[in-house]
Image (spheres, grey):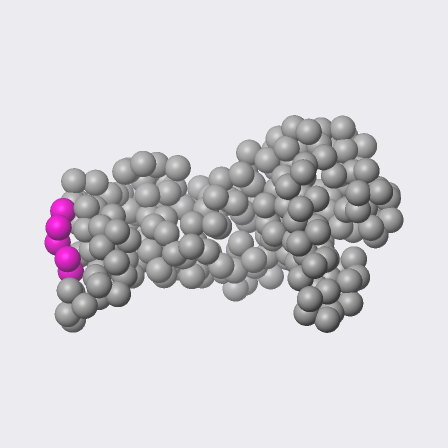
């Protein structure tokens, strides 16, 4: 393989992180880049399942309590200015594409950040009144808004890093994968069962774990912390 040509395609700025992790060993850096790509790919199924289950549960619960246009300004539920902008953008995009502006279409067009914002502290009252019903009856009793938010915030950041093809090897990926699966189960056990059937992360993540820094890739257990800016 012509390392120089690959580095040029990836850009030194992007590939530089892998070179640093590999102490300048270009063959090892390329292997790390490949591992990062495979892990990013393997997380797509859990992340997709979580996003779809989350938005559908929120939409179902809020529709039952406030009508299917619960996201409109007239409904008075949304408290974040950026969320209003996202709804407006979704409607504009649907209109521009000549598609019907239905509640289902708007909901499907809203970003993951829109849904995770529903668990900010500003929504504590909504959680207590209505939103807590998103949890499946089989979920642990007494789940709080913070139980969702403390898992969803890093998952959202991880999702965005994957979407922008950024390095994720320094993250404690087994922990976040476990949290994603936990969230899905709270929302929908059937969705979690389906996800586990198609989930490739356990097979792709190295059994010996990942340790980065000082150019060394050492053998550690999956329960060990991932070094080099752990998340």
For the C terminus, the image quarter is top left
> What residue is at 19 percent from the left and 51 percent from the top?
19
Percent of width and height locating residue 33: 28, 57
> What residue is at 81 percent from the left and 32 percent from the top?
129
Percent of width and height locating residue 10: 27, 61
Residue 159 or residue 176, whichever sits in front: 159
Dividing the picture into quadrants, the one containing residue 104 is bottom right
Look at the image and give the residue range highlighted in magenta. 23-27
> What residue is at 48 percent from the left and 50 percent from the top?
159
- What secondary structure do most residues of the magenta stretch adopt? loop
Q: Is residue 98 left or right of residue 113?
A: right
> What residue is at 15 percent from the left and 64 percent from the top?
4
Count all numbered tags in the image, as a single digit.
0
Residue 62 visible in the snapshot: no
Residue 26 inside the magenta-drawn segment:
yes
For the N terminus, the image quarter is bottom left
Dividing the picture into quadrants, the one containing residue 146 is top right
Percent of width and height locating residue 206: 32, 54
Up/down of 7 relative to 123, above or below: below
Up/down of 122 relative to 186, above or below: above
């Amino acid at each position: 393989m012509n390392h120089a040509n690959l580095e040029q395609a990836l850009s030194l700025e992007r590939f530089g992180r892998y070179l640093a992790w590999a102490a300048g060993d270009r063959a090892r850096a390329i292997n790390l880049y490949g591992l990062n790509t495979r892990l990013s790919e393997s997380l797509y199924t859990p992340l997709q399942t979580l996003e779809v289950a989350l938005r559908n549960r929120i939409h179902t619960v809020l529709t039952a309590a406030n009508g299917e246009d619960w996201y409109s300004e007239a409904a008075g539920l949304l408290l974040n200015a950026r969320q209003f902008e996202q709804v407006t953008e979704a409607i504009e995009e649907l209109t521009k594409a000549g598609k019907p502006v239905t509640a289902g279409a708007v909901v499907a067009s809203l970003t993951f950040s829109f849904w995770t914002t529903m668990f900010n502290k500003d929504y504590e009252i909504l959680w207590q009144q209505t939103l807590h019903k998103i949890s499946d009856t089989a979920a642990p009793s007494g789940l709080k808004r913070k139980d969702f938010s403390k898992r969803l915030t890093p998952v959202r950041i991880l999702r965005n890093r994957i979407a922008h093809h950024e390095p994720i090897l320094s993250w404690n990926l087994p922990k976040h994968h476990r949290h994603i699966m936990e969230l899905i189960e709270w929302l929908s056990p059937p969705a979690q069962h389906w996800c586990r059937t198609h989930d490739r992360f356990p097979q792709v993540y190295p059994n010996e774990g990942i340790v980065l820094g000082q150019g060394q890739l050492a053998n550690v257990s999956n329960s060990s912390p991932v070094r080099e800016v752990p998340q």
